[in-house]
Amino acid sequence: MLRSFRQVDVFGVQHYKGNPVGVVLDAVGLSDDDLRDYSVWSNLSECTFVYPPSSRQADYRFRIFSLSTELPFAGHPTLGTARAWLDQGGVPRQAGMIIAECEAGLVPIRIEDDLLSFVSPPATRTGEVEPGYLAQVIEILGVAAESVLAAQWVDNGPGWVGLQLSDAATVLSLNPNAAGHPGDWNIGVIGALAPGESPTGEDFEVRTFFTEDGFDMREDPVTGSFNAAVAAWMLDTDRAQAPYAVRQGTAMNRRGHLEISVSDGQLWVGGATHVAISGQIDL
């Protein structure tokens, strides 16, 4: 069956420099195996599938798959799905604001021309990282322990543990390897850029890593969920002040740019979105 489809580039400062997400805009009738099969085949970090909402407050409902694993929430798929829905002709109930429904709950998405911003669902896990677990994370990253300024659980769905490193150069020097540490790892790191170091004015460098099938360590080009969760930690502990901007994807020859802001007591994560492919998919 042919279904409406978009592939959207999210958070890029120019086209094809962000993080792509595949969006199937009419997923009614597909089985969970169908969703997993397409997601794995696509080889994208995430794919989403759109349904009519089950909540009266929502404009639509969507499910997120990272290869064969369903996620309760993820950031760049949230914004990419919103852009695809708008591109298809979707009109939100509230002018300038989409309410999207995912497994983690209702997610507000603010529309400001080309900039879309989301409010992250509440953290499901925060607090200190157990020393033995942190030691494994540091070993996987291959970073000197003295370069780790702080660490905390910053999980809003995918399972992130966050580390603040001494500077952006240390972040960019990482070459993680999970050999000898089988398991599900979701690791994010952040380090400050020196004033004037970024020509596009970002304040922090971010990288995120995750394992596939418990062994293969992969890097995500630009990660909305981690940036949302780590921003809450950084702001709550006065390690950063809003608004600020983040650069991600540098080590992969991507140019991700995220805007972190606080409005009406809510933390917003925003970036550019661009429909790269529009058409139909046989699914």
Image: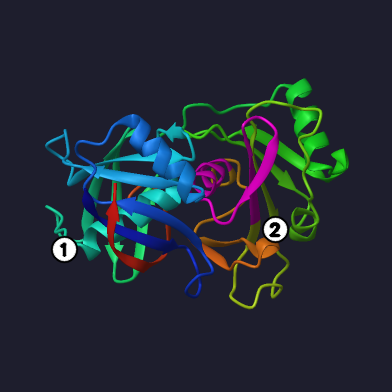
Examine the structure image and report whether residue 216 is included in the region drawn in magenta.
yes
Identify the mark nearer the N-term, 2 or 1. Answer: 1
Residue 135 visible, this orientation = yes
Q: Nearer the viewer, residue 272 or 31?
A: 31
| Mark 1, secondary structure of its residue | loop
| Residue where numbered disc 2 is placed | 192
> Which amino acid lies under the numbered mark 1 shown in the image of this protein?
Gly
x and y, in percent, of residue 78 in the image: 36, 49
x and y, in percent, of residue 58 in the image: 18, 42
Q: Quadrant of residue 218?
A: top right
Q: Vertically, is 212 above or below 283?
A: above
| Residue where numbered disc 1 is placed | 89
| Mark 2, secondary structure of its residue | strand
Q: Nearer the viewer, residue 278 or 206?
A: 278
Q: Which residues are magenta?
A: 206-233
x and y, in percent, of residue 264 in the image: 32, 50
